[in-house]
């Protein structure tokens, strides 16, 4: 069976917006601090000793984070998702005040997504969704910038969409950087230099979709010198980060020896990972491998899954295989397919 290691450029037409997480560190208290015990939680709570003079002293204006310039606040926290923003707001009153506009932006963002997708008891209304996204943008949320860009792009207003992608990208949001790079590839007059510049920025920050798209550019020599080894490196990074398409392509790279040493064992392993995460072509390929090993029952389940996902060839093979199976085995295969759930992954 002839296979293409890499998909066509049409495979890259959809964008995604992902949350941007930040890690925080909680320092351990000093041993000389007094403490008291809270019986309901049975945990030690450390309370610093404050003198009466300190309690009456006015707060230090240098610690009033709400007085920081808005662009600084946005650069620090504009990409926070809702749980991260809530946690940051609990650090102290000053941070809570400083982050209040972004907390409001999260509420607008949530309503925008409801109207965009028709969730939460509301009908799809892209105009209202866009209005909510723009309210979030006005309060500094880079997540809202990306979603506004997505909606403008889907509405055919590509220049407006790219404008919001750029705002998020320049503030360091990896989804904005990736989408901006993809936009430069798909506009009427592609700008390959700008496209690869932004894809590299997002890829180097660990954004798996950008790593995969960068691998495609390197494989096809689009905007960059063709380099199969470098392409395979970025594809494997994306696969290890949980990106399903990259898992499938990594399997094919090992199968064909494109940019990596040929390894059927690695190919089989990555194909199964992609199949178990819902990649229909991987399910079909993995089923054929199981069939070749004589594992007919397992092969039948993956063929059934692939056929349900629209793989026509898988449906033909499944029908032929079912003719060799007892009615009980066929029923068991259908039951296993009904109960199957994909493993968590990035799509």
Image (spheres, rainbow, N blue to C red):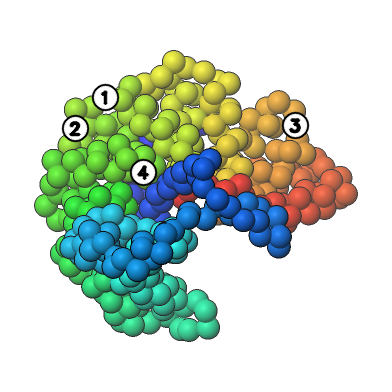
Q: CA distance from mark 3 to mark 4?
A: 37 Å
Residue at the image point whose x is 18% and y is 63% from the top: 69
Residue at the image point whose x is 37% and y is 58% from the top: 80
Residue 289 position in % (x across, y down): 63, 30
Residue bearing mark 2 = 224
Q: Nearer the viewer, residue 134 or 85?
A: 85
Would residue 162 be seen by someone viewing this image from the given angle? no
Residue bearing mark 1 = 227
Q: Earlier in the sequence, mark 3 or mark 1?
A: 1
Q: Earlier in the sequence, mark 2 or mark 3?
A: 2
Residue 275 versus residue 20 in the image, above or below: above
Residue 235 position in % (x across, y down): 39, 33
Instruction: Give the foreground label among 4 and 2.
Output: 4
Residue bearing mark 4 = 207
Q: CA distance from mark 2 to mark 1?
A: 8 Å
Tell me, yes or no, whether the two marked residues, 1 and 4, touch with CB atoms within 8 Å: no
Would residue 275 be seen by someone viewing this image from the given angle? yes
Residue 330 position in % (x across, y down): 81, 49
Q: CA distance from mark 2 to mark 3?
A: 43 Å
Marking on residue 295: 3
Q: Earlier in the sequence, mark 3 or mark 4?
A: 4
User: Where is residue 104, by image quadrant?
Assistant: bottom left
Residue 305 versus residue 284 in the image, above or below: below
Marking on residue 154: none
Q: Earlier in the sequence, mark 4 or mark 2?
A: 4
Tell me, yes or no, whether the two marked residues, 2 and 1, touch with CB atoms within 8 Å: yes
């Amino acid at each position: 069976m002839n296979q293409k290691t890499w998909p066509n450029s049409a495979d890259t037409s959809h964008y995604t917006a992902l949350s941007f997480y930040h890690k925080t560190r909680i320092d351990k208290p000093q041993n000389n601090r007094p403490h008291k015990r809270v019986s309901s939680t049975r945990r030690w709570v450390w309370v610093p000793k404050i003198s009466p003079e300190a309690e009456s002293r006015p707060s230090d204006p240098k610690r009033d984070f709400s007085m920081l310039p808005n662009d600084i606040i946005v650069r620090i926290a504009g990409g926070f998702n809702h749980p991260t923003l809530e946690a940051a707001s609990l650090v102290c009153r000053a941070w809570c005040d400083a982050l209040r506009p972004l907390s409001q932006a999260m509420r607008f963002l949530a309503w925008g997504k409801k109207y965009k997708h028709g969730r939460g008891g509301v009908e799809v209304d892209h105009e209202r969704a866009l209005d909510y996204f723009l309210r979030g943008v006005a309060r500094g949320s880079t997540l809202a910038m990306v979603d506004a860009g997505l909606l403008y792009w889907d509405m055919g207003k590509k220049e407006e969409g790219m404008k919001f992608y750029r705002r998020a990208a320049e503030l360091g949001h990896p989804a904005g950087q990736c989408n901006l790079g993809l936009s430069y590839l798909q506009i009427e007059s592609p700008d390959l230099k700008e496209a690869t510049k932004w894809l590299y920025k997002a890829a180097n920050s660990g954004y798996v979709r950008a790593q995969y798209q960068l691998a495609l550019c390197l494989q096809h020599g689009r905007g960059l010198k063709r380099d199969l080894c470098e392409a395979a490196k970025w594809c494997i990074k994306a696969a290890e980060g949980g990106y399903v398409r990259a898992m499938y392509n990594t399997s094919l790279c090992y199968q064909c020896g494109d940019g990596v040493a040929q390894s059927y064992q690695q190919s089989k392993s990555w194909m199964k990972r992609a199949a178990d995460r819902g990649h229909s072509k991987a399910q079909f390929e993995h089923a054929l491998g199981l069939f070749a090993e004589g594992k007919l029952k397992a092969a039948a389940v993956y063929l059934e899954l692939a056929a349900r996902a629209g793989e026509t060839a898988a449906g033909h093979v499944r029908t032929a295989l079912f003719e060799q199976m007892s009615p009980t085995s066929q029923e068991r295969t259908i039951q296993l397919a009904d109960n199957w759930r994909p493993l968590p992954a990035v799509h």
